[in-house]
Amino acid sequence: MLKSTLEQWRMFKAVVDAGGFNQAAVEVHKSQSSVHHAVQKLENAIGVVLFENVGRKVQLSPQGELMYRRAAFLLNEAEKLEAVADSLQTGTETTLRIAVDIIFPSALLYNVLAKVSAEFPLLRIEIEETVLSGANSLLNNGKVDLAISPFVFPTGFSEDLCEIEFIAVAHKDHPLHHLGRTLTLEDLKSHRQIVVRDSSAERKADVGWLGAEQRWTVSHVRTSVDIIAQGLGFAWLPFAIIKEHIADGTLVPLPLDNNAALRKALLYLSFEDGDTLGPAARAFMGELRYQSMQLPSSDAVLESTV
């Protein structure tokens, strides 16, 4: 027989998160006395003092800090359990929310979405375009159901999805292409590099070579492509996005030594809890895995530019 209830633990966690009983009462839409009574009953039931008075403030006791971590886990699991029940009750979901890193090939994504929409014509699909840690941030905050990200999702499930090839390129008339020799990374330092900003609100990640003395930072890879195509800098860009520009000669791979012009990044397909995913989400994942196996390689295009 349990001595405490989920509601009592929820009130306890609310007090900690909000910073006090009055603040918690506002957050949970209850009276201050109701919140205080729930926490007091919890302390009496489990025989542990959760808060202690320090001057005019109330703060967690050492025992309370331990119980808070356990309570947070308990409440999170309870929310997941109810989400599973909702998915079982409703059957096919009405909305599928997906965070997709902008380096993922858009044409491939559109093919997957078209197949899923044909199978589930009433499904509403919401796409959030993200950069670096942005997809995992949305997934962690419960704002999307699935994430395609260059980082493993630390608190849920992640699987290897595909490898994205990046190529260092500049416009065909860029000064770097007129040096008439193999380039080193030192050669790049005096030229403008175009980089894309992390879209996460919580954690900003910087990845890739950032050694240029002058950098322009943009919010979308398409903007980076436009800037490079104007001859205003260089960048490592996803091959799948710029392959037509390379094929028609507008953008030319930089002749870096030791094959440094080519880099690869692994993308992951992530979700919080597979049991909460409905049939449309599972259909999306299956088609995404299949389509990702068809990604083009840069080998043939690069050989033609040598």
Image (cartoon, rainbow, N blue to C red):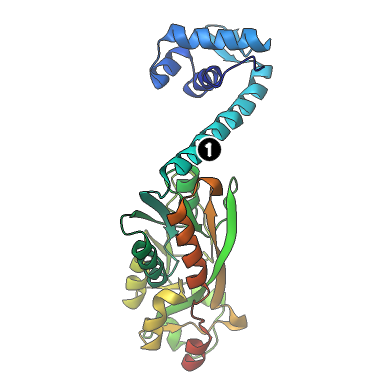
Q: Residue at 47% across / 93% down in the picture?
A: 304
| 65 sits to left or right of 282 | right
- The answer to whether one can see residue 197 in this image is no
Q: Quadrant of residue 23?
A: top left
Q: Residue at 43% across / 9% down in the picture?
A: 32
- Percent across and percent down for residue 297 are 51, 81
80 in relation to 157, above or below: above
In depth, the one of 268 and 201 nearer the eye is 268
| 265 sits to left or right of 240 | right
- Percent across and percent down for residue 185 are 56, 75
In depth, the one of 251 and 98 nearer the eye is 98
How many discs appear? 1
108 in relation to 171, above or below: above
In depth, the one of 115 and 186 nearer the eye is 115
Q: Amino acid at mark 1?
A: Lys
- Which residue is labeled 1 in the image? 80
| 10 sits to left or right of 216 | right
Q: Secondary structure at mark 1?
A: helix
6 in relation to 173, above or below: above
- Percent across and percent down for residue 65 are 64, 22
Q: Residue at 57% across / 8% down in the picture?
A: 41
- Crowd band around label 1 with a 10 angstrom C-alpha radius: few (<14), some (14–19), many (20+): some
| 288 sits to left or right of 62 | left
Q: Quadrant of residue 117?
A: bottom left
- Percent across and percent down for residue 129 are 38, 57
- The answer to whether one can see residue 95 in this image is yes
Q: Quadrant of the N terminus?
A: top right
90 in relation to 216, above or below: above
